[in-house]
């Protein structure tokens, strides 16, 4: 056995032996299990279907901005497999490509081949038992999508969940895309935030607000808003500054804990810098100059008052072309640092009307989070 193979096996075995302690540390708070994000129900249902013999959704990809709880989703899937579905530990491979990459180059397909050969004396095409592959920070394998495609095509006995930064949303193999079920993990909406922090959920209110906006139906919206206000007032754990804190610091699950807000603000800024300096740099033909331009655009947007902003003005500010500004904005949106809202209506109306660009709740220069809406004339 060569040194690389031994290192990989040692890494996987160490991860597996430490997992019971990790699950207890990460999933238990004050003697209670953490509440689930809604995405976990989709993972759980896909696991159940796979075990029952339905191999349709066995390649799940969860891209999302850093800090929204993707790793926790993997831990919860591991816990579910181990303690509720009673899957043997050697049939569950949890792997953080970020950590492994500090030892050897992360190649997901190679790792699976090594594990199956040494643990079960078999290979993908001959596999006769169910294996659950939980891969975190998948973007550290530059060929992650091709690895997933080959594993998917080689065996119907492997169930895969790949999570990673928004870099997963930037480049992937078109053939792999037809096999994967991709679900972007976004920051929490307020209803999800209430569920995680206070174990309270009012889905009826969200549905009624959609009906209010689209159909003008007021009565249900008023009814469920009053119901929610009454429930929260009677919840002794509810913090009446909670809504303001949510707006300032965004839908990051860590907000459900007692935290230092200044530290959270700094962590969010660090996360954004890592997206720009690591994730976006990995894109083909993304130059150092555009890395600088991306940082400048984010700071420029963060320091603007809400209102109109032309793409031409941004191009002049950066001393670059409008086409390049459009390309950078498109990449920033794919990484979820910003997002756009098109005008409601026909396709021709959406093309004519300017987009509203929403900055993802961070003012970089002041290290003070906020939500900013700018109408971008493009």
Image: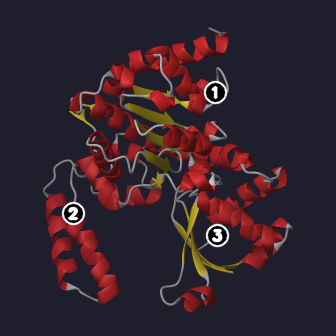
User: Where is residue 263 drawn, in percent x and y?
Assistant: 51, 40
Q: CA distance from mark 3 to mark 2?
A: 34 Å
Instruction: Report the residue at 58% width, 63% height from top.
Output: 338
Whether residue 60 is visible: yes
Q: Is residue 137 left or right of residue 292?
A: left
Q: Is residue 233 left or right of residue 141?
A: left
Q: Secondary structure at mark 1?
A: helix
Which label is found at residue 304? 3
Q: Is residue 210 left or right of residue 345?
A: left
> Could you tell which of marks 3 and 2 lies nearer the N-terminus?
2
Instruction: Report the residue at 15% width, 60% height from top.
Output: 231
Classed neighbour count for the residue bearing mark 1: other residues with Cα under 10 Å, few (<14), some (14–19), many (≥20): few
- Nearer to us of marks 2 and 1 is 1
Q: Secondary structure at mark 3?
A: loop
The part of the image, by quadrant, that contains residue 301 is bottom right
Q: CA distance from mark 3 to mark 1?
A: 39 Å
Instruction: Report the residue at 52% width, 59% height from top.
Output: 361
Q: Secondary structure at mark 2?
A: loop
Give the farthest residue toward the front: 126
- Could you tell me which quadrant the C terminus lies in? bottom right
Position above or below: 256 against 304: above
Q: Nearer the viewer, residue 91 or 369?
A: 91
> Could you tell which of marks 3 and 1 lies nearer the N-terminus?
1
User: Where is residue 41 drawn, in percent x and y?
Assistant: 29, 49
Position above or below: 208 against 26: below
Q: CA distance from mark 2 to mark 1?
A: 42 Å
Instruction: Report the residue at 31% width, 32% height from top.
Output: 27
> Could you tell which of marks 2 and 1 lies nearer the N-terminus?
1
Pointer 1: what residue? 101
Q: Nearer the viewer, residue 309 or 347?
A: 347
């Amino acid at each position: 056995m060569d040194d690389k193979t031994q290192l990989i096996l040692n890494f996987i075995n160490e991860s597996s032996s430490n997992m019971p302690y990790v699950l207890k540390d990460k999933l238990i708070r004050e003697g209670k299990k953490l509440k689930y994000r809604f995405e976990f129900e989709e993972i759980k249902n896909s696991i159940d279907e796979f075990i029952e013999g339905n191999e349709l959704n066995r390649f799940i990809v969860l891209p999302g901005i850093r800090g929204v709880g993707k790793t926790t989703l993997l831990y919860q899937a591991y816990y579910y497999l181990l303690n509720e579905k009673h899957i043997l530990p050697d049939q569950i491979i949890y792997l953080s490509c970020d950590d492994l990459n500090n030892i050897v180059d992360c190649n997901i397909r190679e790792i699976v081949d090594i594990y199956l050969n040494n643990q079960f004396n078999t290979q993908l095409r001959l596999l006769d038992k169910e294996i659950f592959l939980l891969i975190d920070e998948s973007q550290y394998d530059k060929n992650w999508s091709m690895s997933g495609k080959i594993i998917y095509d080689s065996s119907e006995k492997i169930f895969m969940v790949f999570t990673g930064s928004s870099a997963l949303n930037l480049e992937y193999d078109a053939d792999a895309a037809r096999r994967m079920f991709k679900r972007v993990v976004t920051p929490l909406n307020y209803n999800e935030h209430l569920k995680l922090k206070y174990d309270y959920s009012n889905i009826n209110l969200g549905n009624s607000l959609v009906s209010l906006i689209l159909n003008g139906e007021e009565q249900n919206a008023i009814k469920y808003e009053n119901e929610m206000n009454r429930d929260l007032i009677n919840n002794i754990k509810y913090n009446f500054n909670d809504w303001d804190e949510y707006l300032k610091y965004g839908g990051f699950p860590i907000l459900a804990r007692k935290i230092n807000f200044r530290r959270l603000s700094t962590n969010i800024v660090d996360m954004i810098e890592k997206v720009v300096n690591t994730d976006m740099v990995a894109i083909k033909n993304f130059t150092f100059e555009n890395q600088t331009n991306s940082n400048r655009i984010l700071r420029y947007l963060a320091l603007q008052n809400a209102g109109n902003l032309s793409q031409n003005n941004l191009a002049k500010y950066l001393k670059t072309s409008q086409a390049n500004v459009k390309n950078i904005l498109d990449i920033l949106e794919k990484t979820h640092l910003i997002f756009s809202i098109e005008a409601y209506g026909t396709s021709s109306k959406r093309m004519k009307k300017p987009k509203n660009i929403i900055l993802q709740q961070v003012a970089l220069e002041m290290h003070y989070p906020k939500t900013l809406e700018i109408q971008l004339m493009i």
